[in-house]
Image (tube, helix red, strand yellow):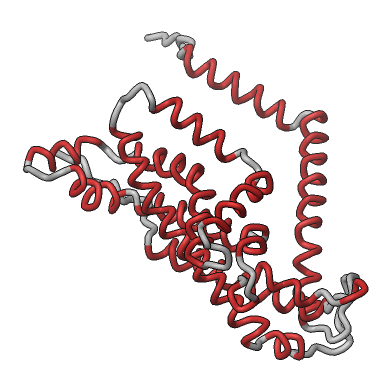
Amino acid sequence: MAITIDQPTATAPGNARTGARDHARSLHMTSPGHRTMRWVANVVLAIVAICFAVPLVWLVLASFDASATLSVKLPTHFTLDNFTKVLTPQLAFVPLLNSLVLSGGCAIVTVVIAILAAYPLSRYRMRVNKPFLYGILFGTGLPITAMMVPVYSLFVSLNLIDNVAGTVFFLAATSLPMAIWMAKNFMDSVPVQLEEAAWTDGASMMATLTRIVVPLMRPGIAVVFIFVFIQAWGNFFVPFVLLLSPDKQPAAVSIFNFFGQYGSVAYGQLAAFSILYSVPVIALYVIVSRGLGGGNALAGGIKG
């Protein structure tokens, strides 16, 4: 009669350590201290969400209220009078068109120059690369208000005051430091092997930049474009100082029209204008993210 003796099953050291870590993690997740911290974190996040949501709720409700005030309340009766009063060439159409010209021109100029500046920083190893990048980073911290006095004097001497093109180029100059930094980081993700193969076939550096690098970093270009556009779209101080004619001022400056004398404010019209003011930015984000997006742009690029 055969007697079978069960041998103890050996547990791999790695599995034992993994099981111990999982057990310790589960005990930590269910510990009273962890539950308290999670509850506190949820309360803090809820308070922050409320702080962001209340102004948005006021914006929507006040835009449909003929007698809107600073308090958040439901309108006694919903009306579109605020939008009707705002949707005029003087209050909405011309300022929004000026904002599109300024912001779009600034974004296009900035993206083109940022790509040309980021290419040598990304592809060449030079001693000046790191100091130059640190100088760019320092440029992002310069307050625009401190530079406007010499800039205004320069614009007066060059006869560029109240000139839309001059304002576009100055906005682009203020956006370039961060745009170059971002474009360089996105360009670093494009494999150099693709350019080396093109150089072997006789392509020039400009050809590889326009035909290989730029198409592969389209998502990064979209991010830089949207970032610069939104910055220029919400810029109030620069157009306020450099553009004097009311028919050239963007929507960020023309918002003064809703502030009357002696502190009176047309809150309903201001809320309606704010909603219209945010629509182009949201539309641009959707269009650019769909048109230039493509997280798998590099998929299969270096196969073989």
The C terminus lies in which quarter of the figure? top left
Image-based side of 213 in relation to 255, left or right: left
Name the residue: 81% across, 41% down: 39
Residue 45 appears at what percent x and percent y? Answer: 76, 47
View extreme (left): residue: 201
Q: Residue 171, can we see it?
A: no
Tell me the quarter of the image containing the N terminus: top left
Residue 87 position by quadrant: bottom right
Where is residue 178 drawn, in percent x and y?
51, 43
Answer with the quarter of the image where residue 68 lies. Answer: bottom right
* Residue at 79% from the left image edge and 64% from the top image edge: 55
Left or right of 90 in this view: 191: left
282 above or below 109? below
Viewer-closest of 61 and 15: 61
Q: Nearer the viewer, residue 105 or 241?
A: 241
* Res 40 → quadrant: top right
- Along the viewing direction, whichever of 40 and 282 lies nearer the viewer: 282
Q: How many marks?
A: 0
Q: Residue 183 placed where, x, y %?
A: 41, 44
Where is residue 54? Give x, y as percent. Answer: 81, 63
Relative horizontal placement of residue 74, taking residue 302 as reference (left or right):
right
Q: Is residue 30 above or below residue 276?
A: above
Q: Residue at x 48, y 57 (%)?
A: 169
The residue positioned farthest toward the right in the image shown: 262
> Who's the residue at 76% across and 90% down the image?
81
Residue 132 visible in image: yes
